[in-house]
Amino acid sequence: MKTASLILAITLVTSSQFLRAEEGNSSLEHQMKILAKGTRQLSQQINDPAQQQSSVGLIEDLKKAAQDSKSIDPRMAETVPAADKAKFLADYRAQMDKLSDAFTKIEEAVKAGQYAEAKSLLASVNSIKREGHEKFKQD
Ligand code: HEM
């Protein structure tokens, strides 16, 4: 009986430590992982008419991830001087809006069956990402 309680106690302690470690992964990182996985998948199927519906669904998920990211402050905000913080966060949110707008344009092109156009618009997402990381992501 004592052994069983000990095993239970160890299990509870280790699983709560695991949960804490998961929380340490800021939820912006979680949204970024959704963006990374979704854009990778989209780039593999965007010019396939047979996947039109699936692509629209993926883009909806990407738009949601960009909107959710917009409301989360990046870690770097903690290191920005108080006087500059409002501008830093406004610029960060504007960059996320740029990303959302790009996804909206891509979605319109996919819905219109303009797959080549959609593919070239998707390439432009990379520069929005690069700019976002240069300005708002800590090393
Ligand atoms: C489709 C476009 C994008 C992709 C695929 C992407 C991908 C990623 C990935 C894989 C990470 C690392 C996550 C981790 O460490 O687990 C990351 C982190 C980060 N990204 Fe992006 N990103 C994109 C767009 C953006 C944009 C537009 C911004 C800024 C407006 C941005 C800001 C950040 C920041 C600030 C972090 C670090 C997390 C933090 O500071 O809390 N990303 N991104």
Image: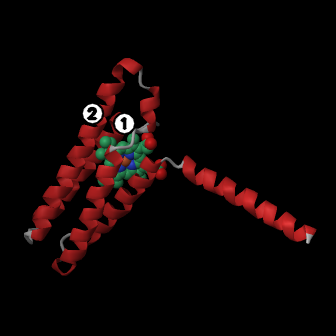
Q: Which residue is mark 2?
A: 91
Residue 136 has which mark? 1
Examine the rendered structure and indicate whether residue 14 appears above or below residue 27: below
Q: Amino acid at mark 2?
A: Asp
What residue sits 44% from the left and 54% below the top? 30
Examine the rendered structure and indicate whether residue 37 appears above or below residue 80: below
The answer to whether the residue bearing label 2 lies less than 8 angstroms from the nearest atom of ligand 1 is: no
- Name the spot of residue 69 as percent of width and height, x first: 35, 48
Q: Quadrant of the N terminus?
A: bottom right
Q: Secondary structure at mark 1?
A: helix
How would you rate the neighbour count of disc 2 (Cα within 10 Å): few for under 14, some for 14-19, many for 20 or more? some
Examine the rendered structure and indicate whether residue 98 appears above or below residue 31: above
Q: Secondary structure at mark 2?
A: helix
Q: Amino acid at mark 1?
A: Phe
Tell me, yes or no, whether the two marked residues, 1 and 2, touch with CB atoms within 8 Å.
yes
Residue 117 has which mark? none
How would you rate the neighbour count of disc 1 (Cα within 10 Å): few for under 14, some for 14-19, many for 20 or more? some
Q: Earlier in the sequence, mark 1 or mark 2?
A: 2
Q: Nearer the viewer, residue 122 or 60?
A: 60
The answer to whether the residue bearing label 1 lies less than 8 angstroms from the nearest atom of ligand 1 is: yes
